[in-house]
Image: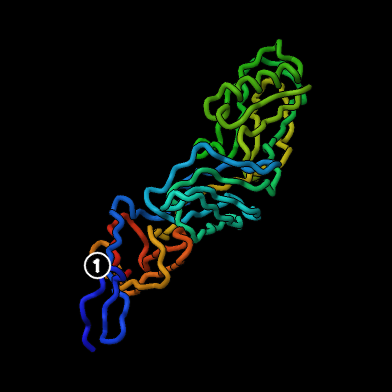
Amino acid sequence: MNLYPYNPDSQRLKTGKSAIDRAFGAHFQVSAANAVAADADGIMALTGLTAAAQEVTAGITDPAVLRNVTITGNASGITGTVTVNGTNSDDEVISEDLTASGTSTVAGAKAFKTVTSVELPVRVHTPAYQTETIEVTHGCSTAGDITVAVTAAALGGASPKSATVTLTTDDDTVTEVAAKIVTALNSDTAIGAAFTASNVAGVITLTADAYAANDATLAIAATVGSTGVTVGSSTNGTAGVAQDKISVGFGSVLGLPMKLAHNTFLYAFLDNTKESTAPTIATSATAVESNTITLNSALSGKVVDAYFLI
C-alpha cells in the first residue's frame, strides 16, 4: 500500500482510493521536583469534623501538577461523603465525591489542577476530654512536702511526672491541700501543657486539654510522707474520645492535560529508565480531568516521561 502526502486541510494520508488519519507522536513529562510521592495531607491537613457538615476553604494547598486527590481519616469507623471542589487543566470547575472509610486512604480518579474547597461530613464519634480524679481525705497535720505524680501517654518520655507540694499546718483542711496540689500540677511545665487540674471539696480532677483516644494508663498518685495527709486511689472519670478528623492529599495518579478517546501510550520512563510494566491509562473524550496516567513504579521525586500518539 502506497501512502501519499496528506491533505493539509483534513490532515489525512491518501492510500490510493482511500485515506487514513495521520497520528503525531507526543511526549508527556513531569519534573523530578513535581513527581513526588503521594502525600495524605498534602492538600489539607487533618481537620476536625463537627456535629454539622462544613465547607473548608482556608488552609488548602494546590497540587504542584495535575494529580488525583485522596482522603484519609484518623479513626476507625469514620464514614460520610467528602466532596472536593476545584478546577481541571482547562480551568473548568469540577468536583469529586469520596466516601470516607475509617483510617484507610481513599483515592479519587479525577486530576485536579486546583482545590478550592472541601466539604466535610458530620462526625461519627462525639469527642470527649479524658478525666481522672483523686480525693484528699485528710488535711495536713505536720508541715512537709508531698509528691504528686501523673502517669499519662500524653507526657511521653516524661511520664510519670512528679510535682512537689509544700504544706504547712495551716493547710489542715482537705480543700486547702487539694488547692495546693492543683496549683502545683497546673504550674508544672509538662503536666500543665497536657492537662488542667481543678478541685471541689477535696476532689481533684485532672482533665486532658486535647481530645484523644482513652489512655488506660492515666493515673494520679500521691506520696504524703509524715504530713498526716491522706489521699484516695486514682479513679477513672470520663473516657477520652478523639475528635474525628479527615485530611486531603494527592495520590499517585498524574493528570494528562488533554482529552483522549483511546489509550495510545507506547512507553513510560521513571528516572530515565523504561518501565517494564506499562502504566495504567484512563481516557475520556469528553472530560479532560478523567485522562490520567499511573506508573507501575511508585513516584519518588524522579522525572517521569511518557510517549504516546495523538
Residue 25 point in image, percent of width and height: 26, 69
Residue 130 point in image, percent of width and height: 67, 38
Identity of the residue drawn at 61% across and 35% down: 210
Image quadrant in which you'd find residue 309:
bottom left
Image quadrant in which you'd find residue 164:
top right
Q: Is 12 placed above or below 269 here?
A: below
Q: Nearer the viewer, residue 142 or 21?
A: 21
Identity of the residue drawn at 52% across and 52% down: 94
Residue 44 point in image, percent of width and height: 50, 44
Is 251 placed left or right of 77 in the picture?
left
Instruction: Give the position of the N terminus as an image quadrant.
Output: bottom left
Identity of the residue drawn at 40% across and 65% down: 294
Image quadrant in which you'd find residue 283:
bottom left
Is 116 placed left or right of 215 in the picture?
left
Q: Secondary structure at mark 1?
A: strand
Q: Nearer the viewer, residue 153 or 159?
A: 153
Look at label 1 and name its amino acid.
Answer: Thr
Is 98 placed left or right of 257 in the picture?
right
Identity of the residue drawn at 65% across and 16% down: 167
Residue at the top extreme of this rendering: 170
Q: Nearer the viewer, residue 277 or 132?
A: 277
Instruction: Give the position of the C terminus as an image quadrant.
Output: bottom left
Callout count: 1
Is 119 placed left or right of 261 in the picture?
right
Residue 215 appears in the figure: no
Q: How is the image coloured?
A: rainbow
Residue 112 appears in the figure: yes
Residue at the bottom extreme of this rendering: 1
Residue underneath mark 1: 273
Q: Is 162 placed above or below 288 here?
A: above
Label 1 crowd bin: few (<14), some (14–19), many (20+), radius 10 Å: few
Residue 249 point in image, percent of width and height: 47, 50
